[in-house]
Amino acid sequence: MDSIQKQVGSRNWGSDSITSPSPKIYGFAQCHDDLSSLDCKICFCQGRDKLPRCLPATSARIYLNGCFIRFDKYNFFHEAIDPMNDAVVCGEPKHPLTDSILKFKKRIASVIHNVTAMALGNGTFATAEAKGGDFSVYALAQCWNTLDRDECRKCLVNAGSKLSQCAPGSEGSALFTGCYIKYSTEIFFKKSVESDDPYDNTGIIVAVTLSTVAFVVLASFGAFIGYERLSKRIGDKTNLRLSPNSSLCFTYEVLEKATENVGSSSILHSVWKHYKASKITDMVDPGLKGVFSQKQAEKVLQIGLLCTQASSRLRPSMNEVVQMLTDVQCEIPSPKQPPFLNASVLSPDSSADSCITEVSLMQFSVESANSLSRSTLG
């Protein structure tokens, strides 16, 4: 999985195997083509976190709406279908239909047929929309890159045929060995890589970046809030743990990209200046004005400034950070000017009890971040 993770980071899919010594093991992972590179890394991390739960089984398949991960004891790279394990998951009708059920079923069958044909025409991936009636129907189809064209066709045709039987359910997913197809009355994929909709981006809710390792806590909050929104999009609520005992999925480079360059002292200066002027929420992404709690945003940013204090005694521990974020009665101390703005030197003890150290950042879990994001920015 370490090897596959590197491949996923560079091209959004990967495969690898170890055949000697025994036992043999084959692994594969691929993101859907509508995901950005950052979204793909997050989805892969979420799926990889689940794999150990399958042990001591010798095989596992993890289907998320954004990616797929599998390991097995044999070479399955050209396996298109598996009647024993292929499955279709159907949802219930969510909306009253003034159209006849028959027309709605035909619309579902049409969009599945179209997305299959488009995926085969494009190579391995396509999205489609069927308009008309009460609700449009959206569909996505994806073959795994290890299949050839005929194998991809075999998987998509079989999966599409089974998936059509989910009608008149409002959504359905075909979880097949060599491919994935989903339809829904609600759009669930990105129409393009670029989007003007802030909710389509795995972005940062509070767009504040500071120049210290300690202040990466803010970047982490933002990335994890983005992760929570992505989790809703890929339809899975399982928590992702970052621990020093496993490969760290969120590298510094990923956080740096997610926060548009973590280390900018000029932004630190702006944050402090806005805090002193009681306008600290002006540092929030302008595209999110009106869709977050101003009071809670002020709280997150003020805690971030506390994490940049010169003395370790003035910087809160992670337990204190959690308490300040979750306890409405907890009084948050007023931060002093960060030392990085006047070139003063940190005290010798500053690295020992930092608000966020490299190890504590690795141990910080998405389970905590998810609950914090719900309590801070909703």
Image (cartoon, rainbow, N blue to C red):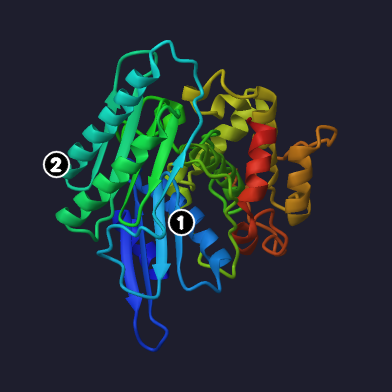
- Position of 150 with respect to 176 (left or right) is left
Q: Report the front residue among 353 and 169.
A: 169
> In which image quadrant can residue 97 be found?
top left
Q: Along the polypeptide, which appears first: circle 1 or circle 2?
A: 1
Percent position of residue 310, x then y: 69, 51
Type of residue at label 1? Ile
Type of residue at label 2? Gly
Percent position of residue 215, x then y: 60, 47
**Quarter of the picture holding the N terminus:** bottom left
The residue lying furthest to the top in this view is 98
Indicate whether 341 appears above or below 102. below
- Position of 19 with respect to 212 (left or right) is left
Q: How many marks?
A: 2
Percent position of residue 91, x then y: 49, 34
SS category of the residue bearing label 1? strand
Residue at the spot x=46%, y=29% of the render? 199
Q: Report the front residue among 167 and 71.
A: 167
Q: Report the front residue among 149 and 302.
A: 149
- Position of 38 with respect to 132 (left or right) is right
Neighbor class of circle 2 (other Cα within 10 Å; few <14, some 14-19, many 20+) is: few
Indicate whether 192 appears above or below 343. above
Residue at the spot x=39%, y=89% of the render? 21
Neighbor class of circle 1 (other Cα within 10 Å; few <14, some 14-19, many 20+) is: some
The residue indicated by pointer 1 is 62
SS category of the residue bearing label 2? helix
The residue lying furthest to the bottom in this view is 21
The residue indicated by pointer 2 is 121
Residue at the spot x=63%, y=43% of the render? 370
Residue at the spot x=22%, y=32% of the render? 114
